[in-house]
Amino acid sequence: MTEEQTPPAEGVDVDALPGGLAAALEAVLMVADAPVSVERLAAIVERPVADVAAHLEDLAAEYAGRDGRPRGFVLREGAQGWRIYSAPEHADVVARLVLEGQSARLSQAALETLAVIAYRQPVTRGQVSAVRGVNVDGVVRTLLARGLVAEVGQDPLGGAVLFGTTAEFLDKMGWASLDELPPIAPHLPGIDALDSVT
């Protein structure tokens, strides 16, 4: 059953549950394997969206240490909704568990290609190759397969496919929008300098 098909918990009075609405939201977010929109959360707990949004903001502030007790996790709203993440300060510790015995990490070439696409999107494969100085076909296929980039259109001049980052990319980075990209774009060549490359 998909998220859209999942029926709300009809007749459940979340205020009568231990911890009330806040605890109910925590329980749902703890088991969610993907970000959940505030509208979906409101439907699940049968409460107004504004009420749920206010509780989410309060929980996020509490987890961020507003009460003076820093935690190992944070609650953030990303491009696809709300989700509980491990705290960035504990990334090295979490990596020991998550990456142990896995080869799921992106290669340096994939990270560089992803950075060029993120900062210069929409961009063609040829333009990315021109920035990196190597052919990026295989790397772009990997990024497409992982859902971090997608085809976003076609170059009106040359007809080449244009690529951009996805909401999945934003969620993996813990960002709500591309406005949160660190300011390193000035170090990359301008796309207008690459217009002849497709």
Image (cartoon, rainbow, N blue to C red):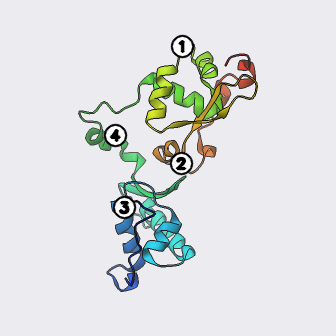
**Residue 163 place in picture, x, y as percent:** 60, 32
Q: Secondary structure at mark 3?
A: loop
- Which residue bears the numbered disc 4? 92
Q: Nearer the viewer, mark 4 or mark 3?
A: 3
Q: Nearer the viewer, mark 2 or mark 4?
A: 2
**Circle 4 Cα neighbour tier, 10 Å, few/some/many (<14 / 14–19 / ≥20):** few
Q: Nearer the viewer, mark 1 or mark 2?
A: 1
Q: Nearer the viewer, mark 1 or mark 4?
A: 1
Amino acid identity at mark 4: Asp
Q: Which residue is found at the position 54% from the left and 78% from the top?
A: 48
| Marks 3 and 1, how far apart at CA | 44 Å
Of the pair 112 and 8, the residue shown nearer to us: 8
**Circle 2 Cα neighbour tier, 10 Å, few/some/many (<14 / 14–19 / ≥20):** some
Whichever of labels 1 and 2 marks the residue nearer the N terminus, that label is: 1
Whichever of labels 2 and 3 marks the residue nearer the N terminus, that label is: 3
Whichever of labels 1 and 4 marks the residue nearer the N terminus, that label is: 4
Q: Nearer the viewer, mark 3 or mark 1?
A: 3
- Which residue bears the numbered disc 3? 1
Q: Is residue 184 visible?
A: no
- Which residue bears the numbered disc 2? 175
- Which residue bears the numbered disc 1? 134
Of the pair 117 and 69, the residue shown nearer to us: 117
